[in-house]
Image (spheres, helix red, strand yellow):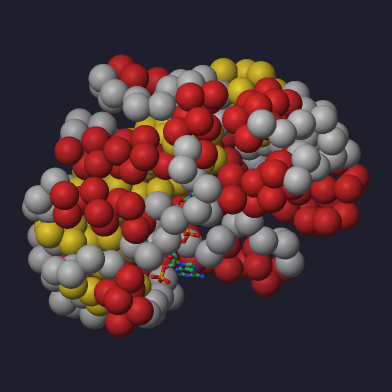
Amino acid sequence: MKVAVTGATGFLGRDLVQGLLSRGHAVHVLSRDVPQALGRLPAGVSGSYFDGQTALAPDALAEAEAVVHLAGEPVGQRWTRDAKQRIHDSRVVGTQVLVEAMKGAGTVRRLIAASAVGYYGGTRGAEPLTEESAPGDDFLARVCRAWEAQALGAREARIRVSMARMGVVLHPEGGAMHRMLTPFRVGAGGPMGSGRQYISWIHRADAVALLLFVLEHPQLEGPVNATAPQPVTNAAFAHALGHALGRPSVVHVPAFVLKAAMGEMAQVVLDGQRVLPRRALDAGFPFLHPELEPALKDLLSP
Ligand SMILES: NC(=O)c1ccc[n+]([C@@H]2O[C@H](COP(=O)([O-])OP(=O)(O)OC[C@H]3O[C@@H](n4cnc5c(N)ncnc54)[C@H](OP(=O)(O)O)[C@@H]3O)[C@@H](O)[C@H]2O)c1
């Protein structure tokens, strides 16, 4: 099938495009810089301009039957007023623009839109959270709710919509793990804040495989938590990462230090949520890396 992908040049998108091509799908990317995107992706991929603000040209979706929507301003930056606006608008307005184009195109039957475990809010402690749990009400939870609501608008055109609530995607090339590696490698890593907050992590290979699984299982409409079955506390995560690197992990980073360094964004690290992938497990998704220690070993092996 022909699949249009936004955010194809990103941390998840590059691997997803590879996965789609290797399964015989045709890929059309939507990017703010099409020549650069096509230069970074394998041959045979086509592309159209998409900036998440301007209405898409009528032929921009190139008769795609499915859309995977990953584009969005990075969350891992200092949350100035402008940055928060970009984090919100790139997702909420971006999804609205994309859905309008999908409705007009008439060829699209499936939308898989990224969302995040931030949907559940950051103050749920050890409460096990499934797709049926109620949303939270902090900044990221409100962004996720509005983002998902825009994606669900595609149902008006009888498009089946799935929202992949991504956990903390682990790979040394990018995301949270990339930022943690340097302090841990020099022995300056350890639990952050109370250490009791949960990290709902997922190996990048499983995150990409789950997006492909959802694409190929249209019955998985609605929210799907994209997290490993065994979330861990921040302290357990720090211990496992230190162990995998053969380094100590005892340098506790207090909340006030993180707040001083990161501002309001520190909330993402100091809060957390214990999210379970109930729908993926019920549908028989075969996790390659369900447990943290072997997952880290795999990610850190040369
Ligand atoms: N990685 C994680 O751990 C994680 C966790 C939870 C949720 N998610 C969500 O999953 C999605 C994919 O994650 P990722 O880590 O692969 O993302 P990423 O690498 O940060 O970025 C994905 C793509 O979004 C586009 N983009 C960036 N800023 C934009 C802006 N201001 N307006 C419009 N487009 C913009 C870029 O594509 P072009 O330059 O080609 O336009 C970029 O390659 C994101 O929506 C993210 O919020 C990721």
Look at the picture and state if 14 lies above or below 183.
below
What x and y, as percent, mark residue 192? 78, 36
Between 21 and 57, the one lying in front of the other is 21
Image point (17%, 54%), residue name? 21
Image point (12%, 59%), residue name? 26
What x and y, as percent, mark residue 51? 40, 75
Q: Quadrant of residue 250?
A: top right
Look at the picture and state if 62 lies above or below 24.
below
Figure label count: 0
Look at the picture and state if 18 lies above or below 240.
below
What x and y, as percent, mark residue 217? 19, 34
Look at the picture and state if 62 lies above or below 261.
below
Image point (49%, 66%), residue name? 90
Between 200 and 55, the one lying in front of the other is 200
Q: Is residue 150 visible?
A: no
Q: Is residue 208 visible?
A: yes
Is 79 on the left-hand or right-hand side of 291? right
Is 202 on the left-hand or right-hand side of 81? left
What x and y, as percent, mark residue 19? 24, 48
Is 83 on the left-hand or right-hand side of 94? right
Image point (48%, 62%), residue name? 72
Is 261 on the left-hand or right-hand side of 170? right
